Image (cartoon, rainbow, N blue to C red):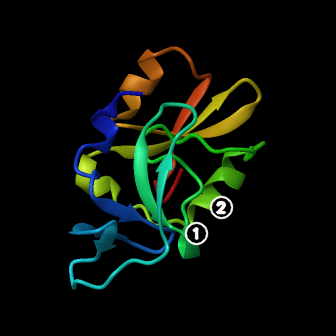
């Protein structure tokens, strides 16, 4: 996955509930736009694509916002993946122009991000590609 997926997210904290801009206040302190220190900020790195991102310990996201990789999380059906996705905050995708997809490969469904469905289908890596956030999929 290209680092293109993280454009616009470099100084954004992504949580299950929200996404918000971060400001470096100096001395190792990061703050939100109101100037409040974020004490439980976690600087994360993806083991799959090496992307770096910020989340909070109190509401950490379980996936890499660049490639969708998750440790020890598997879905046997698209409906299971879609059910899990309902508890996530996807507003950060409006910042980078990507969309969330469920992709079937090697006997399981996976979360993937891309600018469009066609590019995932054209990779010929996945047996099926479905729009994860579509209301009527």
Q: Is residue 26 left or right of residue 49?
A: left
The mark closer to the camera, 2 or 1, is 1
In which quadrant is the N terminus drawn?
top left
Residue 49 drawn at (x, y percent): 49, 31
**Structural distance between the alpha carbons of marks 2 and 1:** 8 Å
Residue 91 visible in the snapshot: no
Query: Mark 2 near mark 1, Cβ–Cβ under 8 Å?
Result: no
Residue at numbered disc 1: 87
Residue 47: where, in percent of width, then height?
57, 35
Furthest toward the front, the residue is: 27
Q: Residue at x 73, y 47 (%)?
A: 73
Residue 74: name its quadrant: top right
Residue 85 placement (x, y as % from top left):
57, 59
Question: Which residue occupies the foreground of this view, 111 or 27?
Answer: 27
Q: Is residue 88 left or right of residue 3?
A: right
| Of residues 25 and 12, the one drawn nearer to the viewer in this rendering | 25
- For disc 2, the marked residue is 83
Residue 129, percent across and down?
53, 32
Rendering quarter of residue 83: bottom right
Q: Residues within 10 Å of mark 1 (few under 14, many from 20)?
A: few
Q: Relative to 15, say whether 109 is above or below.
A: above
Q: Please, is residue 81 above or below residue 111 in the view? A: below
């Amino acid at each position: 996955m290209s680092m293109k997926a993280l454009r616009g997210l470099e100084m954004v904290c992504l949580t299950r509930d929200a996404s918000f801009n971060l400001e470096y206040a100096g001395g190792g302190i990061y703050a939100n736009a109101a100037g409040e220190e974020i004490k439980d900020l976690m600087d994360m790195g993806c083991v799959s694509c090496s992307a770096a991102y910020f989340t909070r310990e109190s509401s950490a996201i379980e996936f890499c916002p660049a490639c969708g990789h998750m440790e020890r999380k598997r879905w046997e059906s698209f409906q299971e993946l879609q059910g899990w996705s309902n508890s996530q905050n996807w507003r950060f995708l409006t910042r980078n122009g990507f969309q969330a997809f469920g992709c079937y490969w090697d006997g399981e469904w996976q979360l993937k991000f891309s600018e469009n469905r066609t590019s995932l289908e054209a990779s010929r890596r996945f047996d099926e590609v479905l729009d994860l956030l579509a209301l009527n999929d």
